[in-house]
Image: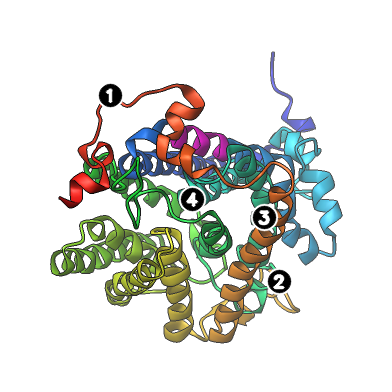
Amino acid sequence: MSLDLASQFAEQVTVNQLVQNVVYASGAISALFVVVGLLLIDVGASRRRSGFNSTIEKLVGFFIGFATFFLIGFAIWASQYYIMTGGTMADSIRDWWAGGVLANSLAQNVDPAVFAGINTYQIFIFFIAVFAGITNVLLHFSVAERMKASAFYVTCFVTTIMFAFVAYWTWGSVGPLTNRGFHDFFGVGFVYLLPAGMALVFVPMLGPRPGMFSAHPKVSEYRSVSLGLTVAGVFVVFASLPMVIMACLFFFDPGAYAVSVTMADTSVGITFNNYGAAWAGGALSGAFIAYKKRRLDYFTMGPFAGYVSGACGFDVYIPWQMFLVAMSAPFVAYAVYELLHKLEIDEHKLIPLFIGVGSYGLLMVGVLHGGTPRGGWLGIEEGPYAFQHGEISLMMQFVGVVACIGTGVVTAFVLAFILKRTTGLKVSEEDQATGLDKVYWGIEPDVEPIAETASPQVEAS
């Protein structure tokens, strides 16, 4: 059967469109490998008696976020572009919720005058949905082994809705905060600061895990499974992110003119090299802290700290700047980590890396690149959405940090109030000590770690 292009819109399915679609699809696939890396980190860093359950909860939480973003989240995020052209969020929801006409139309059947480049936006549903799921995985790192599964799953659904709103405010080029000067290339605000703000509330409520700060009759010392698995997971994440970075660029004719998602001038090579410089700077400082303080976890925390410090500015930094900013990041993480340890707050990932380093990174972009033109949309020459009409502002960076963390804090307080009175929030200390693999699934560990089987009195002697 021949294809009648006269009744369709061939300009929606050109080779140029296909190349861009492959870039964004590759970014979405690479983001899935980030999930693999995070799961490896979790398996390596979890207590042996709860590792299986922790992995299952992360996977279920991931897919709750993924499905919820398909259902309504993308429609909320995309509404910034509807508002830019005089539409409303309701219009975006009508077109882009899971049953919306644009979410379910073949590209060649959609008039470019109605919506140009529709394939790209449809792929972005999948792309951002993966990060909605990743946000729930990250949140679970802070509440693992302590929050009830039912409470966590409800939290995942609500977190994804808030994720969509914070992304609408802060990630794109014409959202309310972005258009006024807040700059976040890689989504630090809604992927990292939002769940970290929630961790600020949940972690003190849930308390420390048995054996973390003091011996328990069943757990004399909290001991992870394998640092080797954790390190392997870190490198899987490192190897997965370059194509994700590529997918955070917009490409316009003629040729492949690249601007960042915030419409700042950039290029593929600069963003890639900044990414590498961030990991390298963080890794070297992290290794220094690890050797100096005899703290093995900084071999893994250091590279992540460097990356998080630069993620919001990979598009505007130049590599030597990025390297120096990243070298300082592990020291920020170390200061926050040590404070949490002194306060006996059992949270070693989200608060040091995201509240500490993520905030530091967002503010440093304002310090070093305040005044950089960005915002608006290419082709609009005047008005509140004119191309690059806005500038990066230190004040707006601060406002954005407060908004993202504050949204997480408020969301967690509301959820905790409701969950305590319905499903319950916390796994009992006895079940935590026994191990959730046995409590929920009847799984016994294949090895009995000496640190967990020995009583505190035996160890003290």
Q: Earlier in the sequence, mark 2 or mark 4?
A: 4
The residue wearing badge 2 is 176
Q: Nearer the viewer, mark 2 or mark 1?
A: 1
Q: Quadrant of the N terminus?
A: top right
Q: Nearer the viewer, mark 3 or mark 4?
A: 3
- Which amino acid lies under the numbered mark 1 shown in the image of this protein? Asp
- Which amino acid lies under the numbered mark 2 shown in the image of this protein? Pro
Q: Which mark is residue 138?
A: 4
Q: Dot 4 lies on which element?
A: helix
Q: Earlier in the sequence, mark 3 or mark 4?
A: 4
Q: Is residue 151 left or right of residue 287?
A: right
Q: Earlier in the sequence, mark 2 or mark 3?
A: 2
Q: Is residue 3 magenta?
A: no
10 Å neighbourhood of mark 1: few (<14), some, or many (≥20)?
few
| Color encoding of the figure | rainbow
Residue 53 vertical placement versus 260 (above, below): above
Q: Earlier in the sequence, mark 1 or mark 3?
A: 3
| Rendering quarter of residue 276 | bottom left
Main SS type for the magenta part? helix
Q: Is residue 391 left or right of residue 343?
A: right
The residue wearing badge 1 is 446
Q: Dot 1 lies on which element?
A: loop
The residue wearing badge 3 is 416
| Inter-mark Cα distance, 2 to 1 | 53 Å
Q: Dot 3 lies on which element?
A: helix
Q: Residue at x 20, y 56 (%)?
A: 296
Could you tell me if the residues under marks 2 and 1 are in contact, i.e. CB atoms within 8 Å? no
| Rendering quarter of residue 180 | bottom right
| Inter-mark Cα distance, 3 to 4 | 18 Å
